[in-house]
């Protein structure tokens, strides 16, 4: 039995391992999409009939983020500190990635003369990190990857960043309202988050508020990432009451297998998926495999970029071969991003904002 409250302490979990596995799953899932069709498809999606590796990697990221970001606000108890730490975590890697995109990927793969490439406004628009992170503006370079299967898209996973930022905003607002300091408050915070998710706000051409069209899902996904973030918030709020058992995880998987051909197969799978992810993140059996460095964000950002490079050079490679060729370059970019961009900024920010944190394992008021 592994109490979730204990796992949320600094050194009592394998959450970095979960994030690493999620990033690898996203990269592997994209390998089926980037290369030209070779007759093979995502075997997980074939077996389940709804989602594949890439989707489950994203869901795991959002589940972990919901728990840990909520824990961050509860620990800091300060809106400015929370905002500063969120910016320090998400922005520097994107800024570094945009520079790599413009000054390395672009010049190597553009079909335009370099003079025209650097004279194009499209090239320098990729320095607008605010639009990338908040407004869902992807990286597109003139003459780059224009003949790829994913035309001109340098980093497809960027679409999740604005969603993540909106989830951060929900944590910030509900935290400032004092809802994250008690179990009942977290329930109300999650209810408000679900309501905000269900509503669609249109500002142009005039203000309109309506219900979300739940038939519209992210491309290639059969569900949405936001509910996994909200579930992570709820799990954090009730961490003292939640214990993770390996046998329970196995039991949930068995229940899904028994009912996999029924109408309830998909929700049963998601329930088992969440519990298994929590088990991986909390079991001492996997503690030795927890990475010392968090390369997951870098893998997530640079994975698709490197895969697009391979697809541009050799579009007819099998997806397994292309993924293996891209892997060392992805790992190198992620390691450099962590070593020279992400970690230095995080360390500096934490030192500047240092204060005595409230232990996240302390029970909430009922």
Image: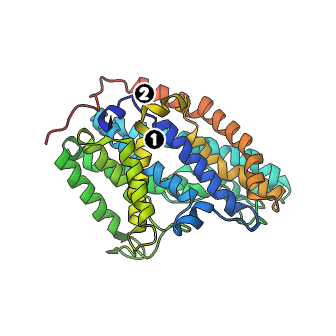
| Label 2 neighbour load within 10 Å: few <14, some 14-19, many 20+ | some
Looking at this rendering, what residue extends furthest in the left direction? 366
The quadrant the N terminus occupies is: top left
Q: Earlier in the sequence, mark 2 or mark 1?
A: 1
Q: Quadrant of residue 257?
A: bottom left
Q: Identify the disc placed on residue 315.
A: none
Quarter of the image for the C terminus: give it: top left
**Res. 119 visible in picture:** yes
Which residue in the structure is indicated by mark 1? 280
Q: Nearer the viewer, mark 2 or mark 1?
A: 1
| Among the 4 quarters of the image, the one containing residue 334 | top right
Where residue 170 appears, as percent x and y from the top left, is 32, 52
State the image coordinates of residue 266 (x, y, percent, origin top left). Answer: 43, 66
Would residue 258 appear left or right of 191 to someone viewing this image?
right
Q: Nearer the viewer, residue 241 or 116?
A: 241
**CB-based contact (under 8 Å), mark 2 and mark 1:** no
Q: Secondary structure at mark 2?
A: helix
Relative vertical location of residue 104 with respect to residue 120 in this rendering, above or below: above
Would you name the residue on which mark 2 appears?
350
Look at 27% across and 41% down and name the residue there.
239
Residue 226 visible in the shown view = no
Most foreground residue, 223 or 113:
223
- Horizontal placement of 327 versus 132: left or right? right
Which residue is at the far right? 113
- Few, some or many residues within 10 Å of mark 1 (<14, 14–19, 20+): many
Q: Tell me what residue is drawn at x 63 percent, y 62 percent.
A: 42
């Amino acid at each position: 039995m592994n109490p979730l409250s204990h796992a949320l302490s600094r050194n009592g979990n394998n959450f970095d391992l979960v994030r690493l596995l999620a990033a690898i799953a996203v990269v592997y899932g994209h390998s089926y999409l980037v290369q030209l069709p070779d007759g093979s498809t995502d075997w997980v999606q074939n077996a389940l009939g709804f989602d594949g590796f890439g989707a489950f990697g994203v869901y795991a990221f959002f589940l972990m983020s919901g728990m840990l970001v909520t824990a961050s606000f509860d620990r800091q108890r300060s809106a400015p500190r929370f905002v500063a730490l969120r910016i320090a975590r998400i922005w520097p890697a994107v800024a570094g990635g945009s520079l790599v995109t413009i000054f390395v990927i672009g010049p190597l793969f553009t079909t335009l003369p370099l003079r025209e490439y650097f004279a194009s406004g499209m090239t320098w628009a990729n320095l607008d990190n605010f639009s990338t992170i908040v407004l869902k503006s992807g990286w597109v370079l003139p003459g780059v990857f224009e003949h790829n299967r994913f035309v001109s898209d340098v980093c497809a996973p960027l679409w999740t960043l604005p969603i993540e930022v909106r989830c951060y905003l929900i944590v910030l607002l509900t935290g400032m309202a004092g809802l994250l300091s008690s179990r009942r408050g977290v329930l109300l915070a999650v209810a408000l988050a679900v309501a905000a998710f269900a509503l669609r706000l249109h500002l142009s051409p005039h203000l309109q508020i309506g219900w979300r069209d739940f038939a519209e899902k992210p491309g290639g996904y059969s569900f949405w990432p936001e509910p996994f973030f909200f579930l992570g918030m709820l799990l954090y709020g009730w961490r003292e009451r939640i214990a993770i058992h390996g046998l329970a995880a196995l039991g949930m998987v068995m229940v899904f297998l028994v009912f996999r051909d029924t109408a309830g197969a998909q929700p049963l799978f998601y329930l088992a998926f969440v519990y298994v992810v929590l088990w991986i993140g909390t079991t001492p059996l996997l503690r030795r495999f927890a990475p010392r460095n968090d390369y997951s964000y870098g893998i997530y950002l640079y994975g698709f970029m490197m895969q697009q490079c391979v697809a541009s050079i050799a579009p007819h490679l099998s997806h397994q071969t292309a993924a293996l060729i891209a892997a060392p370059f992805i790992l190198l970019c992620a390691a450099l991003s962590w070593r020279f961009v992400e970690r230095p900024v995080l360390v500096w920010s934490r030192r500047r904002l240092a204060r005595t944190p409230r232990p996240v394992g302390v029970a909430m008021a009922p």
